[in-house]
Image (tube, helix red, strand yellow):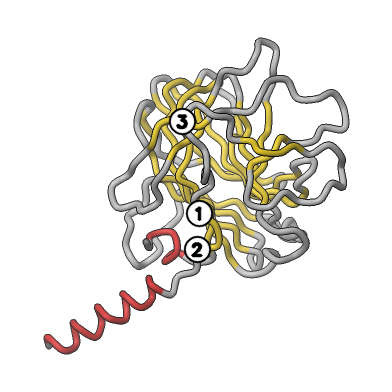
């Protein structure tokens, strides 16, 4: 019996060690209080700025406001991604939102299979009762065309989260506390045309059931080229500890 348990433990350990974390340490080189953006897109077809945050390009009027800054560290028991976060809010009056884009890969590198984006977020304020998106995977790094995105809405002194893929949206049935750090995982499945959302999941080997799922056949055609964060004034707090991987083992591994 002991040999069987040892063998199972070794298999689980090997599975985690072989998990491929495609990107992490999204704020590498940033110090607390410094702007996170290290570049800016100035044309629709500008080349991708890999592995850095950049100001998004707008074909109309430029976005109002400056780069968000690096903020305090967030932590969540059992989640191994460490480091500084992004401070949310602080845009000038009249600013709707201002997007920052973290470049992954150009072309169709991430256009088949399944991908996971995990991160921590702590909202200290969330004013809007509508569904406000704040994080997405994007298919056009210059103009911010999102396909899988996460939104939230105010529920009194709590929040409700949701996930969308193109025009389809699905919200959680559970509400979540403000002023609390939540682990959020977005799963993009190209084969199923599906975006799934996990809120504060158990960090075990087996992937749990999703809290919300949005499906739209044919919505996922282009590859994931980056991650977009929308800074707004109707919420405040911190978001960070991003990890982009191709397996659940990559989310929970070291």
Q: Farthest residue toward the left? A: 2
**Numbered-mark total:** 3
Per the image, label 2 sits on a secondary structure element best described as strand
**Quadrant of the rendering where the N terminus is positioned:** bottom left
In terms of image quadrants, where is residue 23? bottom right
**Residue corresponding to mark 2:** 21
**Residue corresponding to mark 3:** 32
Q: Is residue 78 left or right of residue 119?
A: left
Q: Position of residue 36 (x, y in %)?
A: 58, 35
Residue at 42 percent of width and 66 percent of height: 249
Q: Is residue 22 above or below residue 135?
A: below
Discs 1, 2 touching: Cβ within 8 Å: yes
Q: Is residue 241 above or below residue 2?
A: above
Q: Position of residue 48 (x, y in %)?
A: 76, 51
C-alpha separation, residue under disc 3 versus residue under disc 2: 25 Å
Residue at 49 percent of width and 48 percent of height: 242
Identify the mark nearer the N-term, 3 or 2. 2
**Quadrant of the rendering where the C terminus is positioned:** bottom left
Q: Position of residue 161 (x, y in %)?
A: 49, 37
In terms of image quadrants, where is residue 65? top right
Residue at 71 percent of width and 47 percent of height: 166
Q: Is residue 233 above or below residue 93?
A: below
Q: Is residue 242 left or right of residue 143?
A: left
Per the image, label 3 sits on a secondary structure element best described as loop
The circle on residue 24 is: 1
Name the foreground residue: 151 vs 170: 151
Local packing at callout 1 (Cα closer than 10 Å; few below 14, some 14-19, many 20+) is: some
């Amino acid at each position: 019996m002991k040999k069987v348990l040892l063998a199972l433990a070794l298999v689980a350990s090997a599975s985690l060690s072989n998990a491929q974390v495609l990107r992490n340490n999204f704020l590498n080189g940033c110090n607390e209080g410094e702007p996170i953006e290290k570049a800016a897109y100035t044309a629709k077809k500008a080349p991708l700025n890999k592995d850095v945050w950049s100001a998004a390009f707008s074909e109309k009027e430029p976005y109002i406001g400056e780069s968000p800054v690096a903020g305090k560290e967030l932590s969540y028991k059992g989640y191994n991604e460490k480091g500084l976060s992004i401070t949310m809010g602080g845009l000038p009056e009249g600013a709707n939102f201002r997007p920052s884009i973290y470049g992954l890969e150009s072309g169709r590198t991430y256009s088949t299979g399944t991908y996971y984006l995990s991160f921590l977020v702590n909202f200290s304020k969330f004013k809007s009762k509508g569904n406000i998106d704040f994080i997405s995977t994007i298919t056009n790094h210059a103009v911010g065309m999102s396909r899988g995105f996460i939104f939230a809405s105010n529920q009194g002194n709590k929040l409700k989260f949701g996930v969308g893929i193109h025009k389809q949206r699905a919200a959680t049935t559970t509400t979540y506390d403000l002023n609390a750090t939540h682990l959020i995982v977005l799963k993009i499945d190209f084969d199923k045309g599906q975006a799934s959302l996990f809120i504060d999941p158990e960090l075990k080997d087996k992937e749990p059931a999703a809290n919300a799922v949005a499906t739209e056949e044919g919505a996922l055609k282009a590859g994931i080229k980056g991650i977009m964060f929308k800074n707004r004034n109707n919420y405040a707090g911190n978001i960070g500890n991003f990890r982009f991987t191709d397996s659940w083992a990559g989310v929970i591994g070291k």
